[in-house]
Amino acid sequence: MAQLPSQTGPVTRPRNTRRRLLALALAGALGVLAACGGGGGGGGGEEAEGPVTLNVGVIPIVDVAPLYLGMKKGFFKEENLTIKPQTFAGGAEILPAVQSGDLQIGFSNTTSMLIAASKGLPVQIIAQGVQEGATESEAWTRIYVRGDSDIRSPKDLEGKTIGINTLQNINDVMTKAALEKHGVDVSTLKFAEVPFPEAVQTLQQGDVDAVAVVEPFGTLAEESGARDIIPSIYTVEPSLTVATYFTTEQYIAQNEDVVERFVRAMNKSLEYAANNPDEVRDTLGSYTEIPDELIDKVLLGQWSTDLNQPSIELMGQLSKKYGLIEEEPNVDELIWTPGGS
């Protein structure tokens, strides 16, 4: 397959809109900012097995439900850990907060971690966050068009404008890779940066021809009459690791026992969430602003303790192909293992 240029197609931005009902209804789902409080975070050589408070940076979306469910079930308390979630708009804000020590642990998409590692930043993945669905019906990242659109197949998107939440990141990469798998010349595509909460309205107003979104915005798109063309990440790699929990190499070196305890509790939380979807849905209302009428309809992520390293390596290859990084980082070094270097 031919090497593609680093930026495929011109970048455009849709015209400003005055009616932002969706953004108002769901702004909290991706736009909440909370101060990073103190609370005695484990910043320097905590005593083994002693009580520790961890400030954990998260985005208030479906993906992080296992963390909140694990807190509710007492899995972190069993490890003598107190978790204080700090909500951010996205991983781009979480990463520097972890580096500065304001947060001990953060949640971020896989592409952002690969970009950080490629720049030599001393961060390591410590636990699974969320994966794409294993089957097409479970896929929760999709590309939508308006119900009355003439676009009927991926090839029909050639030359069209697609709204994505962030340029040069995971949604950008996976949208291109998925469409290219269907024979689309991605160099003809135009991309517009559209925040997830504004995606459905922007699509229906005709500012873009399609949008690539995650839950709950896919469910909202369908309720607005939009049609999905293809699942994006699933098309590239089922069960791909979309996001993970991470910390700094320095924090691990000074607090490896704490990290091990967090990972044990997090893995227990991931397994419990995977086996108890009803309890996951019950948890969503406690930390997101997803409307009650959507909680029972949204597609849930796939959760497991397996980091699916091959999928992270694939993401590294795609990130290089589409110009996000110059060299693929060593994923073995990016992923922390207990007792490892």
Image (spheres, rainbow, N blue to C red):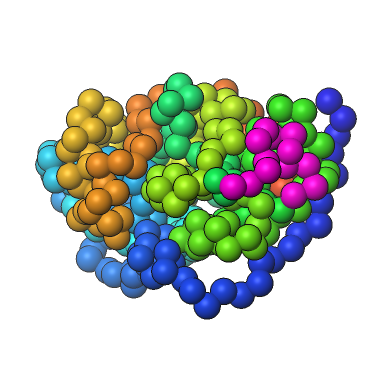
328 shown above or below 254: above
Judged left or right of residue 318, residue 258 is: left
What residue is drawn where x is 81% and y is 51%? Answer: 9
Quarter of the picture holding the N terminus:
top right
Place residue 244 in its image quadrant.
top left
Q: Is residue 141 in view?
A: yes
Q: Position of residue 229 (x, y in %)?
A: 59, 36
Q: Main SS of the magenta segment?
A: loop
User: Relative to the observer, which residue lies in front, 145 or 78?
Assistant: 145
Place residue 157 in its image quadrant.
top right
What residue is drawn where x is 65% and y is 57%? Answer: 208
Q: Position of residue 173 (x, y in %)?
A: 66, 42
Place residue 337 in its image quadrant.
top left
Magenta span contains residue 92: no
316 shown above or below 30: above
Magenta span contains residue 156: yes
226 shown above or below 267: below
User: Relative to the observer, which residue lies in front, 22 or 44?
Assistant: 22
What residue is drawn where x is 28% and y is 56%? Answer: 291
Judged left or right of residue 77, residue 43 is: right
Q: Is residue 115 in view?
A: no
Q: Which residue appears farthest toward the front when viewing the image?
A: 148
Q: Position of residue 86 (x, y in %)?
A: 32, 62
Judged left or right of residue 77, residue 122 is: right
Total number of numbered labels? 0
Give, as a single range, the part of the protein colored magenta: 148-160
Q: Position of residue 100 (x, y in %)?
A: 46, 64
User: Relative to the observer, which residue lies in front, 4 or 290?
Assistant: 290
Q: Which residue appears farthest toward the bottom when viewing the image?
A: 18
